[in-house]
Image: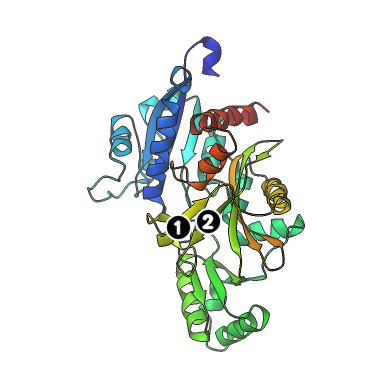
Amino acid sequence: MATETGSTVTVGLVFGGCSGEHEVSIRSAQAIARALASGTNVAKYTVLPVYIGKDGQWQAGPEAAAVLAAGVPPQEAASAATPRLRLPQFEQIDAIDIWFPVLHGPNGEDGTVQGLFTLMQQPYVGSGVLGSAVGMDKIAMKMAFAQAGLPQVKYLAVSREEVWSNPCIFPKLCDRIEAELGYPCFVKPANLGSSVGIAKATTRKELEAALDSAASYDRRIIVEAGVVAREVECAILGNGNPRASVPGEITFQSDFYDYDTKYTSGQSQHIIPAQVPEDVAQRVREMAVTAFEAVDAAGIARVDFFYVEATGEVLINEINTLPGFTATSMYPMMWEASGVSFAELVDRLIELGFERTRR
């Protein structure tokens, strides 16, 4: 580790990526870069920005720094990057001591980049291949949660082949969903982050359209029963002995917490700590740690729950192993409310990345 020789640790801050959350990734990376350049972190870390374009091309140094400073992707049309350009080959790569991936969604949060860093025998922040992949795939994730005894809403796993099947099979699939889950229900692609491609269905016609849409995004689809509940979240920090933050709550006026609601200013409100009974808050924290361990996550995660106030039930919704990291994202805000500043948080995450590699 570089600090043992008295020099700073060079952090390869990787952002952008080939997913629908490209722009959010840039904003998260901006916040992390500012945190690494503030307080005591200034003397500890040197940041090397590494930008992955929407075409998959890796860039480091001045080009990446320019994107980070602008806060938006370059205006020029994406090039047809060759397979060779879709690998990190820049000159500064050997100077990187640890990688900090800030890549939300597919091609970054799903174990692919983590596998690359593992092959390179380089330390990195966050979950490994297994934790990332299981946390990304909603069907595998829910199976892991069920095995760990965590209560969930009723759901059904569906394949693209069932949706885009012959006219005899598709109606039977819809019949089964109506019989087992009823309306309203939510149809989600299994492997897309940030509420992309999710639709609420309240009629047969809406269900058919939602399934067709989800199948265009992913070959694995999950359909969940609707529930009248409050949306409560909890942040996790750690490796072998993970800590849970105070829970937070998200409120919104839209029909459900979709992509536009999540990333449009003023569309949702954060309440931290969540105004729930202490026993509910404690259950949320305990279940968040259980979920983190169930998928073999590491370092960082945000776990989302439904709190059914009418019955007192707490149901787990999902885990996010690379949550949004902007200054107004729930993950750093919940830690701020738990006594860990943004700058301390990124410092601790880097330490955890090194710790996990050494073990």
Q: Residue at x 61, y 66 (%)?
A: 229
Give the colouring mode of the picture: rainbow
- In-front residue for pair 112/203: 203
Q: Residue furthest left?
A: 76
Q: Disc 1 marks which amino acid? A: Ser
Q: Are marks 2 and 1 in contact (CB under 8 Å)?
A: yes
- In-front residue for pair 336/12: 336
From what the image shows, is residue 272 above or below residue 48? below
Mark 2 falls on what kind of element?
strand
* In this picture, residue 32 sits left or right of residue 284: left
Mark 1 falls on what kind of element?
strand
Residue 335: % across, % down: 56, 39
The residue carrying mark 1 is 268
Where's the N terminus, which quadrant?
Answer: top right
Q: Disc 2 marks which amino acid? A: Ile
Mark 2 vs mark 1: which is more N-terminal?
2
- In-front residue for pair 255/5: 255
Residue 43: % across, % down: 45, 17
Residue 118: % across, % down: 57, 36
Q: Residue at x 76, y 57 (%)?
A: 147
The residue carrying mark 2 is 250
Residue 280: % across, % down: 70, 54
* In this picture, residue 120 sits left or right of residue 305: left
Q: Residue at x 28, y 35 (%)?
A: 66
Is the residue marked by circle 1 packed among few (<14), some (14-19), or many (20+) residues within 10 Å? Answer: some
